[in-house]
Amino acid sequence: MSSRHSRHLLEIHAAVMLFGLAGLFGKWLALPSTIIVLGRVFFASLSLAAVLKLAGHPFRLNRRHDYFFLSLLGVLLALHWVTFFESVKVSTVAVALLSYSAFPVFVVLLEPWFFREPFHWRSLLLAAFCLAGVALIIPEWQWTNHITQGALWGLVSGLSFALLSVFNRKYVRDYSSLQLAFYQDVVALLALLPFLFFEMPLFNTQQLLLLLLLGLVFTALSHTLFINGMKSVPARTAGIIASLEPVYGIVAAAWLLGEMPGWRVLLGGGIVLGAAAFATFFRPGKGQEGKKAKLQMPEMEENL
């Protein structure tokens, strides 16, 4: 294994670890989810703009209608992150990460509608397994239960990210992931800006530093590391590493927050992750290029 390949593997591992740890900020920051995401995209947009400038990437888009499509993706990104942090706030980091991780199953269900591809019975089977996993995570089907709320918010986060992935594949083909991330972060910033006046948050120095850290290190840097690592790491390998995101997040939450997931969450999460992994790597009719395009989505992040 060459030193260059080893470095790129380490970059992807570091990026995925940062993706997984981003959810902890939902517990550390005593701010509404909309304000957390607003701060995140504000600092991420500034840093991504600097990276684009230094890398020599153009800011101008090729076609006028691409601005509309990227604006749509930016709104979806804002929805994805807000619902994810809301899931973290009302439940636990583990519940949020595991329920969000169902997004590959949503992707295989949505793609036939958008690309006129044949619908396979395997997709329904995956959806059934995913629902069974979520049912194990949820202790009771009542909105008053915080774990139930967290799991449902996490599913909405996963669904919005699945839509983001599908729209990205359908409409945007001619731009680097850094360009996509920058424009989507800027649009998410504009979409969430009104909440600054509705919520009227009072920031202290610690909160501003945490938001700066979340935007620069856990968003812009993690995304840049992941993209750079993809230069020599195969898409399948990167996808396997990316599946560790919930693991990193759950271990970190247990260590730093004392959140120890119960057996139902772990068992249900394992089923969800299994269905998601199968949906990612064994999609009928999908070649390596399709997988690679999906893996280079902004905030595969995210998650985070």
Image (cartoon, rainbow, N blue to C red):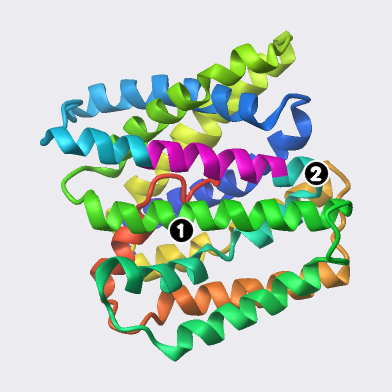
Residue depicted at 42% across the width and 55% down the height = 163
Residue depicted at 63% across the width and 75% down the height = 130
- Return the mark for residue 162: 1
Residue depicted at 86% across the width and 71% down the height = 263
Is residue 234 one of those drawn in magenta?
A: no
User: Residue 48's spot in the image, x, y percent?
Assistant: 36, 27
Q: Are marks 1 and 2 in contact (CB under 8 Å)?
A: no
Residue depicted at 16% across the width and 47% down the height = 174
Q: Secondary structure at mark 1?
A: helix
Identify which amino acid the numbered label 1 is placed on: Ala
- The quarter of the image holding the N terminus is bottom left
Q: Is residue 86 left or right of residue 299?
A: right
Q: Is residue 159 left or right of residue 198?
A: left
Say above or below: 139 vs 49. Answer: below
* Highlighted range, magenta: 73-86
Identify which amino acid the numbered label 2 is placed on: Val
Badge 1: few (under 14), some or many (20 or more) residues near its Cα, within 10 Å?
A: many
Q: Is residue 24 left or right of residue 65?
A: right
User: Residue 299's spot in the image, x, y percent?
Assistant: 46, 45
Observer able to see residue 13? no
Q: Residue furthest left?
A: 62
User: Residue 212's spot in the image, x, y percent?
Assistant: 57, 20
- Return the mark for residue 35: none
